Image (cartoon, helix red, strand yellow):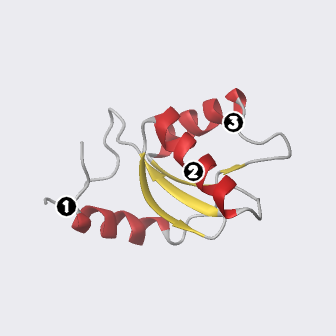
Amino acid sequence: MKLSNKQKQYLKSLAHPLKPVVLLGANGLTEGVIAEIDSALDIHELIKVKVPTTDRETKALIFDAIVRETGAHKVQSIGHIIALYRQSEDRKIQLPRN
């Protein structure tokens, strides 16, 4: 499933008031963190993850790894926070048509 620009804008508006659900710690991106992100996506569909690192390249690599490992769509990344969306079987969020 590919998200259109209209759908991404809609998801960004929904993600704006959300607080980060998962915070990466000193150990970085571990299997446990991936499992927690995966679980949060199953429950909420749209989440924010905070990655506290000062290196831009490292942060970009972590964001890419999260997207790849969870199969989620990157909705937006601002600073240390990335917003992710993955549709669940319940389809809690009704996306606008293309």
| Of callouts 3 and 1, the N-terminal one | 3
Q: Please say whether residue 50 is visible from this viewpoint.
A: no
Q: Residue at x 36, y 36 (%)?
A: 88
Question: Is 35 left, or right, of 43 in this rendering?
Answer: right
Question: Residue 75 versus residue 97: which sits nearer the camera?
Answer: 75
Q: Give coordinates of residue 71: x percent, y percent.
A: 42, 36
Number of other residues with Cα within 10 Å of mark 1, as a class: few under 14, some 14 to 19, many 20 or more: few
| Of callouts 2 and 1, the N-terminal one | 2
Whether residue 10 is situated above or below residue 57 in the rendered picture: below
Q: Which residue is mark 1?
A: 96
Q: Give coordinates of residue 85: x percent, y percent.
A: 42, 49
Question: Is 1 left, or right, of 24 in this rendering?
Answer: left
Q: Give coordinates of residue 62: x percent, y percent.
A: 63, 47
Q: Quadrant of residue 3?
A: bottom left
Q: Secondary structure at mark 2?
A: helix
Circles 2 and 3: CB distance less than 8 Å? no
Q: Which residue is mark 3?
A: 33
Q: CA distance from mark 2 to mark 1?
A: 26 Å
Q: Nearer the viewer, mark 2 or mark 1?
A: 2
Question: Residue 58 versus residue 42: which sits nearer the camera?
Answer: 58
Question: Residue 28 versus residue 40: which sits nearer the camera?
Answer: 28
Q: Given the image, on which type of amino acid does mark 1 rest?
A: Pro
Q: Which residue is mark 2?
A: 63
Q: Secondary structure at mark 3?
A: helix
Q: Nearer the viewer, mark 2 or mark 3?
A: 2
Circles 3 and 1: CB distance less than 8 Å? no
Q: CA distance from mark 2 to mark 3?
A: 13 Å
